[in-house]
Amino acid sequence: MKHPELKRYGLLAFITLLISGIYLFWCARVNGTGFPLDDAWIHQTFARNLAEDGQWAFVKGEPSAGSTSPLWTLLISIGYLLHINPVLWTMSLGITGLIFTGVICDLMWRRFQVLPKNLFPPLFGLLIVSEWHLIWAALSGMETILYIFVICTIFYLLLKESPPWLLAGLLTGILVWIRPDGLTMLGPVLLLAVWNGDPWKKKARSVGLVLAATLGLILTYMVFNYHLDGTIWPNTLYAKQTEYAVLREESLILRFFKLFGQVHIGVGIALIPGFLAKLIQVIKDRDRWAISANLWLIGFIGIYAFQLPVTYQHARYLIPVIPIFLLMGFSGFIYLYKMFSHKKTSMVLVGKSWLMIIIAVQSGFCILGVKTYAMDVAIIETEMVSMAKWISSNLPVDARIATHDIGALGYFTKNELIDLAGLIDPEVIPIIRDEDELLKYIRSRNTEFLVTFPGWYPDLVLQGQKMYDTKGQFSPQAGGENMAIYQMQ
């Protein structure tokens, strides 16, 4: 990397570290550091067991495909091998991933916009690393930011005059090891491999390289899961779709626009005109790369609208489309801003006002994101983690516990868990929303305790006697409940 680029991306790294530091500082001030999702503790449990015993298992001695991101779990396990604090190590991975994402996105934008090489500020990179969803994802303990980085790297490679098709195929296959829906990237890669000016013989060779690399890694991934659980995909993939099947009763179009709207909760709302303007422009110009990127964005959201239309946890499953949306929106803004600059004074003022709105909205949501992240972490720490630590200190290790949230419980206790979410107990998946059947299942497993938020299983909790609840202050503040433990009758 040349000196000007080192300077440019050194600034980007500094800004990323500064913003991440502010998020973590505020989080520590509110209630201490941790993860904003219980699922992050599932990764930690798999990683710890892998490092300590060489087992791919949530429960030691019981191999399981409950980890949706084997590659992320493997990276986390390195911290355990090096005896580094797991939260510190995982946060470091996430922040590093955000820096690299900012760099690759800025490089992608510069190539897409064909900007002067001596332009110093990494404008788009700064937009990326200060977007609150992406910061939240980087500090979530989840695989999301690694997933986004690989997606953006593939799109960057596809922008080259002669894309390295083998590498693009390999990265697409690797994506599936990070998250199963990474398979969607095969669409734009194959589209561009076919839709170009190369002779058909060369196109066939490009497609062959992509398919050989991608399918080889995907088949390996399927064999890995089948060996562990007898299914080619992780249990989570089946469990989540079954659990939220009721949401698919709504109109597909309405589901799509609800999910698409989640992308705009932030600076995206200010870039909608730019996105639409750029979309029109790339269609007129028949820009193959941009058309393929937009088809992927729409298709990705469409798949979730069709199969898993959930918006909880800040629509975390849709966060990966944000960089591509922002790329189009910001490029459209630059296009219109330049157009306004050559018009009369009133249009120049419109362009400058729009720029100020973008800066204000981005800054405002970045600040709100600090509070949101701190609250999310505080809820997990004072509910799931607090309950897990109480159980570790107050219940015998041979007590069987049924719960929907297995992350912190699996990490901090040694008790046998009856997983009501179907991640490590796939036999639960067909009855995941049927409390009568769940009660029979719980009793068939001689379960002694149930840990849940009361509203999640209103009928099940009536079959037990409440022993303890966390009395945490943050969940009620957010409109939720306190997690409780019930002794089953």
Image (cartoon, grey):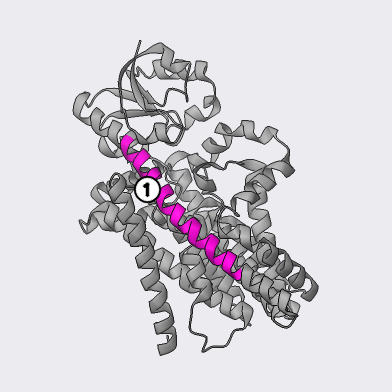
Drawn side of residue 242 relative to residue 458, left or right:
right
In the depicted view, which residue is nearer to us: 54 or 407? Answer: 407
The answer to whether residue 401 is visible is yes
Drawn side of residue 407 relative to residue 435, left or right:
left
The quarter in which the C terminus is drawn is: top left
Q: Which residue is mark 1?
A: 374
Q: Could you say where residue 96 lies in the image, as x and y percent from the top left?
A: 37, 66
Element at badge 1? helix
Q: How many marks?
A: 1
* Residue with the most extreme front position: 345
- 358 in magenta: yes
Q: Residue at x 35, y 66 (%)?
A: 18
Drawn side of residue 201 relative to residue 259, left or right:
right
Q: Which residues are magenta?
A: 355-382
The answer to which image quadrant residue 93 occupies is bottom left
Q: Residue at x 34, y 59 (%)?
A: 22
Q: Could you say where residue 334 lies in the image, as x and y percent from the top left?
A: 64, 75
What is the three-letter code of the residue carrying label 1? Ala
* Residue with the most extreme top position: 489
Q: Could you say where residue 92 lies in the image, as x and y percent from the top left?
A: 32, 61
